[in-house]
Amino acid sequence: MDEASISPAEATRLLGISEEEAGRLAHPDGRVPLEVVRDRAGVATLELARELARAREEVGRLSGQLKEVRANNLQLQKEFKVSVEERRRLTEEVLELRAAAEERLMLMERVERIAHIEQKLAESEAELEKLRSRGLMARLLNQ
């Protein structure tokens, strides 16, 4: 057994390749030379480094997006707080207007009652005046 080689099963495990591919890498004695494993591992390492670089770029891009989303979220929270305060203010204003309208309605009802009383008073005074003038006429005619 040569010290500078490993079994195809070990090559499969180390390189993350299929047993069939490891068999193709093996020499006629059925063992995979360490030099081939080192070369393949170098290619795999290079691929992993490229993948890592792409992943880092993606992380950077996503981190930037996350910052934008957080800033947008903070702005929306501020706008929501302002709109809640505005809604409270408008609700208070509506309640004040409703109270003023109810007070105005009560005053209008009082004015109508007073106008009705004044009308009755005027009618009564007119009738009283008629009665007085009839009484005066009757006295004048009776004398």
Image: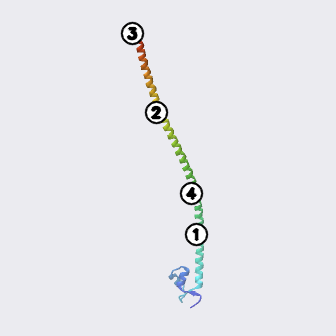
Residue 70 placement (x, y as % from top left): 58, 59
Q: CA distance from mark 1 to mark 4?
A: 26 Å
The answer to which of marks 3 and 4 sits earlier in the sequence is 4
The amino acid on which the numbered mark 4 sits, given as a three-letter code, is Asn
Residue toward you, 124 or 36? 124
Q: How far apart are the two marked residues, 1 and 3, measured between alpha carbons?
A: 126 Å
Q: Which residue is mark 1?
A: 55
Q: Position of residue 123 (x, y in %)?
A: 43, 22
Name the image quarter holding residue 2.
bottom right
Q: Name the residue that disc number 4 marks.
A: 73
Query: The residue tagged with tag 2: helix, strand or loop?
Result: helix
Circles 2 and 4: CB atoms closer than 8 Å: no
Quadrant in which the C terminus appears: top left
Q: Quadrant of residue 5?
A: bottom right
**What colouring does the structure picture have?**
rainbow
Secondary element under disc 4, as helix, strand or loop, is helix
Mark in the foreground, 3 or 4: 3
Is the residue 114 above or below the residue 140 in the image? below
Residue under pointer 2: 109
Q: Which mark is residue 142?
A: 3
